Amino acid sequence: MLTLVLMAGIATGLTALIITDSKVRALDGTRTQAFYTAHAGLENLTASLGNLFDSNYAPSGAQINALTTTPPNLGATWTAADGTSGYTITYPKDANGNPVASTMTVTTGPFQGLIGQATPYQMAVTAHLPDGSEASLTRTLQTVSIPVFQFGLFSENDLSFFAGPNFNFGGRVHTNSNLYLASGDGSTLTMSDKVTAVGEVIRTNLSNGWPLTSNYNGTVNLITAPNAYRALATNEGSLVGNVGTAFNEPKWTNLSTGNYNHNVANGRTGAKQLTLPITNFGAQPIDLIRRGLPNENTANPLVYNERYYSFASLRILLSDNAADITGLPGVTATAPVPLGNAVATAIPGYSGPPLAVAPNMSATTTNRGYGIRMPLGTPMLGGYIKIERQDTGGVWHDVTLEILNLGIADRQWPTPVGTACGDPNPAAVAGKAILLLERPRDNSGACLTTPIPFTTTGANDMSPNALYDTREGIYRDGVATTAPIEVGGVMYYIGLDVKNLSRWFSGTIGTTGAGSMNVTGYVVYFSDRRGNHNAANAETAEFGFEDIVNPLSASGTPNGALDTGEDVNGNGLLDTYGATPIPPNTAPGGAALTWANIAAVVAGNPYVAAMKPSSTLEGNPATTLGPAIARRNPPVFFRRALKLVNGSLGNIIAPGLTVVSENPVYIQGDWNANGGFGDPHVATAVIADSVTLLSNNWDDRNSFTGAHDLTQRTATTTWYRVAVIAGKGIPFPQPAGTAQDFGTDGGAHNFLRYIENWGGQTLNYRGSIVSFYRSRQAVGIYKCCTDVYSPPTRGYNFDVDFLTPALLPPRTPMFRDVNTTGFAQIIRPH
């Protein structure tokens, strides 16, 4: 009996123990389930904040709070212990309830050492399951915005250094690809801040394959600690040779992490790829400067909102057809203005100077007719223009006529240079023109009567603005100085008078500029696609002619095959549609001229259907005929540009101005400076397909008469204070018989382009140099130093003002990151 009682007790106890253990295990299981449910909710909230931050580096309080209103459906309720929401984000707020960011130096991660704007956030998530179990988790994190202009030099693609003289730009250096380091014989390249390359660090070759055993044997000094340097030898790169050779290990890792204390790194020793938010949404970096796509503002707002097109203060759009403008996202209903009409009645509300048209060719021996190769009445400008202003509330307004009625004509080029001709615009608006679409024809040194009369004769007196870019015109350096002008080098530009633009934004001229969008300054967006058509008659924003390298030809003659360095848009095809000449229209939207009736105007007319970008114009730069034809006729290839003028110290509106162009940009004369870097300077940036610096001595006429003769294009010391984002070319193997640096993209020291003889003069530049993409319009490959330019003394320096976020140019692109700083589970008694 006692044994039975004992056995029953043991059984009862064992049963109780099993039941209790089962209950504990069940409780642990539900708690675990609650924990992972809460953790999933926390990750969802973190991801939502990250996505918002990617699309908006300064989200509002309302946008942050909206993330908490739709917790994930995971079979749980989200309620805190006090009955309030269990799915929350808290953050420091300003008076308007928006997150407050503070300036900080990043201490960890790929942005370590850079200064950014950081906002701390705390997330709290409590998940309740139906069985009553719950879990509460918290996470602290910070969003960090890093401005790209905090880098001295940044490149999405390969980055090269091989300056002949000493070179030390300053600032941090980064490339998402490979870094080539070299210096001219007897000179020193100094990298005075941290240097990172996601790809490889090459010390044995230039990017075109040229071995450093022949020339470029100078010193490459890299920083090891503040004010301390060590020379990186040619056998100390991350590879034993050029790209494709073996890793130089363990030597490279030991040098990078040891001798250089991580101040020099590649992907294997800590360098991380840095990307723009727009690329996270399926777009490319070049989409920053491109127009929005039809309906993109609703179909893909994340990409649309990253384009400068969408958040500019002022945008200027030109196309051959009105529908190519009216079909763009966000444009106003006001119709674009045609630029092919010679009389005011054709443009209701327009009162500016007459628009240029071809004169009567019966007067071929007069100054008026000389050089014109188009039928009578052919518009010299053509196409449509639409200009829109965005107000401080984000609403767009058409201001086309307001801007055009301030004048559209630049002053006449006088002879000699320095002679002051009068303002060709109507007397009522003299000195107020913002956009310069045309200028009076040359008149054998004499000034025309100004203002230009608003008559057919006055229209005959006007010519399009054009300059000759030798880099774009010729395939190889070293052509004869008397070689005829090549049509592909004639760049038709619109001038932007920055002083008058600033006066308009400030309300001094015009009527509505003072109400324009101003976010730490103003942004102007420019896109001219007139003449830009592919085989399907669609605009592409690209020149569309890539047959530019042709390594087996001493003259670079196009060969019809896709060679290394030619596929600038990366589509795997050799695009040549840009080499198909397009006759001007008789009027915008009207019937196109035929090549037959253009050729019939003048015997031997060079404007024919067989033209190519490399076609030459009769005559040569030493005679009047070639330059006259190039300067006075409308374009037949897509060669459009923007020229910035009158931007010297004090002429640019405070607190800053950013100019963004889908086309190449030429900056003429002192910019944000005046014979020196003085005050009051402002924060400025130019973001474009390419950027070419023209000196204070630049003369459009001399670019034609001295098309291949540098003695006709002599620069003078000039100063530029501006951050630059632009494209560059693709490196390719050096063709036999060419210069040792031919096939490179020109290197960091030639990223800012020149087309003058700078010998003996200094080009003073202070700013930040960034390349996110390949140039799609200014595709002329780098070449020096016989025809295109002679290098200046480079007074280049990183602008340390950009290390202070408040002193950055308006709408500086930001790299963005979300860093977790803490995580905890809250345990409450039950």
Image: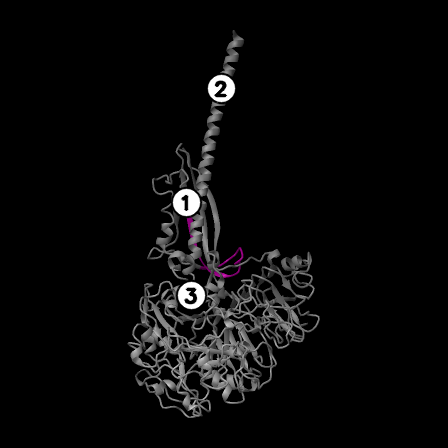
Report if the CB atoms under discs 2 and 3 are less than 8 Å apart.
Answer: no
In percent of width and height, residue 56 lies at 41, 58
Tell me the CA gap for discs 2 and 3. 75 Å
Please say if 808 is above or below 619. Answer: above
Task: Determine whether the residue tagged by mark 1 lies in a helix, strand or loop.
Answer: strand
Q: Is residue 105 magenta?
A: yes
Which residue type carries mark 3?
Answer: Arg
User: Which badge, 2 or 3, is on the more N-terminal residue?
Assistant: 2
Q: Nearer the viewer, residue 678 or 618?
A: 618
487 relative position to 366: left or right: right
Tell me the CA gap for discs 2 and 1. 41 Å
Instruction: State the residue position of label 3.
Output: 291
Whether residue 547 is visible to the viewer of this picture, yes or no, is yes
In percent of width and height, residue 58 lies at 40, 58
Q: Looking at the rendered structure, which numbered label has been put on residue 475?
A: none
Q: Looking at the rendered structure, which numbered label has been put on residue 15?
A: 2
Which residue type carries mark 2?
Answer: Thr
Main SS class of the magenta portion in the image: strand
Whether residue 368 is visible to the viewer of this picture, yes or no, is no
- Magenta stretch: give its range: 103-125
User: Which badge, 2 or 1, is on the more N-terminal residue?
Assistant: 2
Task: Determine whether the residue tagged by mark 2 lies in a helix, strand or loop.
Answer: helix
